[in-house]
Image (tube, rainbow, N blue to C red):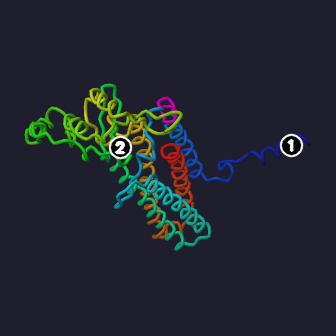
Amino acid sequence: MDSTVATGSEENVWGGGNKPLGASYGKLMMWFFLVSDALTFSGLLAAYGFSRFKFIETWPIADEVFTHVPFVHGNFPMIYVAFMTLILIISSVTMVLAVDAGHRMKKNAVIWYMFLTIIGGAIFVGSQAWEWATFIKGDFGALETKGGRILQFVNTDTGERAAIADFAATIESERVNHEKKNGVWYYEGQALPSYSLNEVIAGVKANSNIQIRTEAIIQEGEGQGEKTLLSREESLAKLTDAVQVVEGANLIQNEYGSRLFADFFFFITGFHGFHVTSGVVINLIIFFNVVLGTYEKRGHYEMVEKVGLYWHFVDLVWVFVFTFFYLV
């Protein structure tokens, strides 16, 4: 008798039937998808962390890379990235409010909160696209050595980075031989940089206030955490190692430092951006269904809750991406 009672009690506790923990099939599948996606992002961020640790002495400094604000000239480290993060967090809050309104069957409130969520997601995606564009274009330009190291330039009069355009010389023969109309750039290689290697070298030699800064980070002592600044004599000697001019960043070159940084940046932030874009599209579909009264007729707004789970996941992943790329 006692054995029967115990067995029945155990079945009541653990027997979830076809709805474990009271979750619907759709919601449970969403959780399975999010767990698998979390493992994917974890692997990518772990690979990034390992690579950064291995090449920590040459890794770009985020405060020197992400300094742009749209329509504003100047050096504003992390300001715009912080704005993007704030927008995404606020959109997560509006999604919570939309789910809550759905539980209380308030159609108009769901419509407005989902609309705000979609706007926030669109702003984030647009901001990320703009950030990519500025990262690819670059600001200052640099030289790359035979070993793939990056040589940046500093104006010792101001103590700030110097753009190649500010000091490079103009050598007529260099520009004439490489005009686009000659077709050399198209048939035999990639598009040429704004200035040739010889023009940059000539500009450095002609301007005594220009010195080279290597991508190596000072690990201890005075200037710890900063890039290594060479003396004028060392800078002139280092020019002999340069083989090409680098402007901006792509999957092959990176004027900011280690090319691995650019590879990871494009892949991980692009993968996350794809998730956000997908979320915006899905939210749009759910939004129009809400407007049409589809879920009102069903008697529940579970679809809003399911897409809300996805949106919160995307928001949470960005917190880790933001921390790894911009803060640590």
Magenta stretch: give its range.
48-56
Q: Residues within 10 Å of mark 2 (few under 14, many from 20)?
A: some
Q: Is 85 part of what is drawn in magenta?
A: no
Q: Tell me, yes or no, whether the two marked residues, 1 and 2, touch with CB atoms within 8 Å.
A: no
What's the CA distance linking mark 1 and mark 2? 82 Å
Which element carries disc 2, helix, strand or loop?
loop
Judge from the rendering whether residue 33 lies leftward or rightward of residue 195; answer left or right.
right
Q: Which mark is residue 6?
A: 1
Residue 200 point in image, percent of width and height: 23, 38
Q: In this view, does 145 lie to the left or right of 173?
A: right
Query: The residue under label 1 is which amino acid type?
Result: Ala
Q: Nearer the viewer, mark 1 or mark 2?
A: 2
Q: Name the residue under label 2.
A: 156
Sequence-earlier tag: 1 or 2: 1
Please provide percent x and percent y for residue 152: 34, 38
Where residue 52 appears, as percent x and y from the top left, is 49, 34
Residue at image coords 40%, 46%: 65
Amino acid, disc 2: Thr
Screen quadrant of the N terminus: top right
Residue at 43% over, 55% down: 76
Left or right, 21 with respect to 286, comes to right
